[in-house]
Amino acid sequence: MWDQKLFRPQLIFKGSKNVQWFAGYSYLRNFNADVMADPRVRTEHNLWEQVLYKTPLTKGSFATWIRLEHRFQEALPLQKDKALRSFDFSSRIRFRVIYDRPLTIPDVKLPTSFVFYNEVFVLMNSKGIPNQFNQNWTFLGLKLELNKQITLNTGFQKNTISKSGGNFLINRLWNTTLFYKL
């Protein structure tokens, strides 16, 4: 069963050996868990900016990034008639820390690394001030460099998502992400 489909093209600007700037667009299709829901898909469009800082370690690397997202989410309740659909605007900030440790020797045919990251999402109010916890992602897995253009990350992820009334939804899932560079 689909939970979400995501398409995220981006531009990367290398500021220095350790700093990169990103800008991009995200298209999301979020699926209602109720397979009988009609309509079942909620669309989202995002514009975003991000800065990444990466530093090498004796074995591996440590990186951190911060991303500002401008989100256009299809308003609820969802409408069957596309002409009646509207979108709500909001922003959030995301902060991720990443540890990457190679598991294979350099110049191997399939470079493989252990990857760990933790990411916190915080909603922003209408004045652009971070004010509310949204969710947290924790990931443990492998990064496989299939070739110079294609990288596959696959592993266990735990998502903790804030719900109304101080409740939290906890999802444990196997996450696989394919990165393709032009």
Image (cartoon, helix red, strand yellow):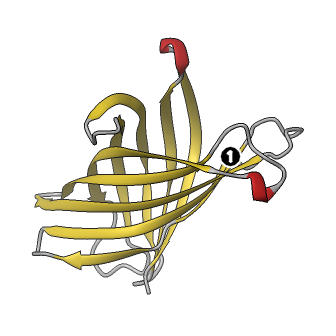
Residue 165 image offset from top left, x and y in percent: 52, 12
Taking 87 as reference, is 25 above or below it?
below
**Residue situated in front as seen by the camera: 157 or 160:** 160
Residue 168 is left or right of residue 86, and the answer is left
Outermost residue to the right: 36
Q: Quadrant of residue 111?
A: bottom left
**Residue situated in front as seen by the camera: 46 or 161:** 46
The residue under the point 28% across, 42% down is: 128
Q: How many residues crowd mark 1 within 10 Å: few (<14), some (14–19), many (20+)?
A: few
The residue under the point 39% across, 84% down is: 148
Q: Quadrant of residue 14?
A: bottom left
Taking 28 as reference, is 168 above or below it?
above
**Residue situated in front as seen by the camera: 174 or 97:** 97
Outermost residue to the front: 84
For the image, the number of numbered tags is 1
Outermost residue to the top: 165
Q: Which SS class for mark 1? A: loop
Residue 150 image offset from top left, x and y in percent: 47, 78
Instruction: Indicate the quadrant containing the C terminus: top left, top right, bottom left or bottom right.
Output: bottom left
Task: Determine which residue is flagged by label 1.
Answer: 3
Residue 1 image offset from top left, x and y in percent: 77, 47
The residue under the point 65% across, 51% down is: 86
The residue under the point 21% across, 55% down is: 63
Tag 1: amino acid? Asp
Residue 95 image offset from top left, x and y in percent: 28, 45
